Image: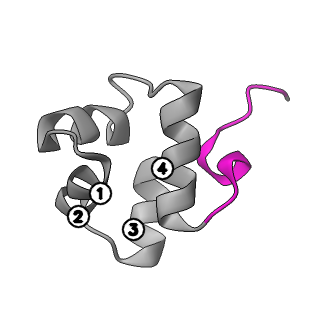
Amino acid sequence: MNRIKEVLEEKGIKQTWLAEKLCKSYNMVNSYVQNRRQPSLELLNIIAEILNVDVKDLIVSNKK
């Protein structure tokens, strides 16, 4: 699972803006945000760069 939705909300950024920056469709970005699909690690790194956060901030750990 990822935290893209939370980071976008924290920064006040719209999914459409992120889709433009990634050259992806809104539907694809929305599927990442809703955790229906997971971006590749490479794409996750690009998203982190665009959002100016550490890639770790976009990942939900499954460790307890």
Front tag of 1 and 3: 1
Q: Is residue 3 visible?
A: no
Mark 1 lies on a secondary structure that is: helix
x%, y% of residue 26? 14, 44
Q: Residue at x 21, y 40 (%)?
A: 24
> Residues under labels 2 and 1: Cα distance?
6 Å
Q: Is residue 3 left or right of residue 22?
A: right
Q: Residue at x 31, y 48 (%)?
A: 22
Residue 41 in the image: state x and y as whole percent: 58, 28
Q: What residue sits right under mark 4 in the picture?
A: 47
Q: Nearer the viewer, mark 3 or mark 4?
A: 4
Q: How is the image coloured?
A: one colour
- Label 3 residue SS: helix
Mark closer to the chain start, 1 or 3: 3
Name the residue type under label 3: Glu
- The magenta-colored residue range is 53-63
Q: Where does label 3 land, which residue?
A: 9
Farthest-out residue, right: 64
Distance, label 1 to label 4, CA atoms, is 9 Å
Q: Hey, what amino acid is under mark 1?
A: Lys
